[in-house]
Amino acid sequence: MPSAVPATEPATEPAADPAATAFDQTPAGTPVEKTDAQWREELTPEEYRVLRQAGTERPYTGEYWDTHTRGVYKCRACGTELFTSNEKFDSHCGWPSFWAPLAEGTVRYIHDRTMGMDRVEVRCSTCDSHLGHVFDGEGYGTPTDQRFCINSVSLKLVPADDAGQ
């Protein structure tokens, strides 16, 4: 059973991306509050199912599970920077895996006992969207011995080459 990861305070510094629109990026620490109708209007049905209803995409079907592009992974719902390619690793589980978030406070943790399992859910600290789960002690040999198993549909990769544009 993975140990629960303590909740953290939201980051106070805004993520840097001056060319982003309000929908593409929300400064970290600025909570996003929208009605269910607004989320349904802005997200595709699959994005809504995963991000707002804590669904899971099928393994090996998401856009980023085997991507090795250098860059930053943002929350698909609000644009907050969550993970980078530097912490991404091949876990061969069918979903993108990271050994740590971009910075403390960018994600929050909830003890999840659904589906007959005992695990730790990972959510965006800014908009409270479901991202996936984190698992401890699986022996992947990563610096934190954690695997952030994140749904591709919860993320938007901004390649390093596009970062200043």
Image: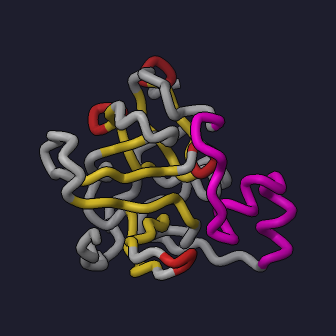
Residue 131 appears at what percent x and percent y?
Answer: 52, 59
Q: Is residue 30 left or right of residue 90?
A: right
Which residues fall within the magenta stretch? Answer: 36-61
Q: Residue furthest front?
A: 116
At x 30%, y 78%, the residue is: 7
Q: Residue at x 39, y 72 (%)?
A: 119
In the image, residue 135 sits, relative to residue 69, either above or below, namely below
74 left or right, relative to 7: right
Q: In the picture provided, is 87 more to the left or to the right than 28?
A: left
The residue at the point 65 percent across, 35 percent down is 61
Quarter occupied by residue 1:
bottom left
Query: In the picture shown, does residue 123 fall above or below 76?
Result: below
Residue 26 is covered by the magenta coloring:
no
Identify whether 42 is placed above or below 151.
below
Q: Position of residue 97 (x, y in %)?
A: 39, 42
Rendered view: 147 above or below 106: above
As for residue 39 lying within the magenta part, the answer is: yes
Q: Residue at x 43, y 66 (%)?
A: 122
Q: Position of residue 32 (x, y in %)?
A: 59, 72
Instruction: Report the front residue among 156 and 160.
Output: 156
Name which quarter of the figure residue 129 lies in.
Answer: bottom right
Q: Which residue, as the protein is rendered here, is positioned at the far top? A: 161
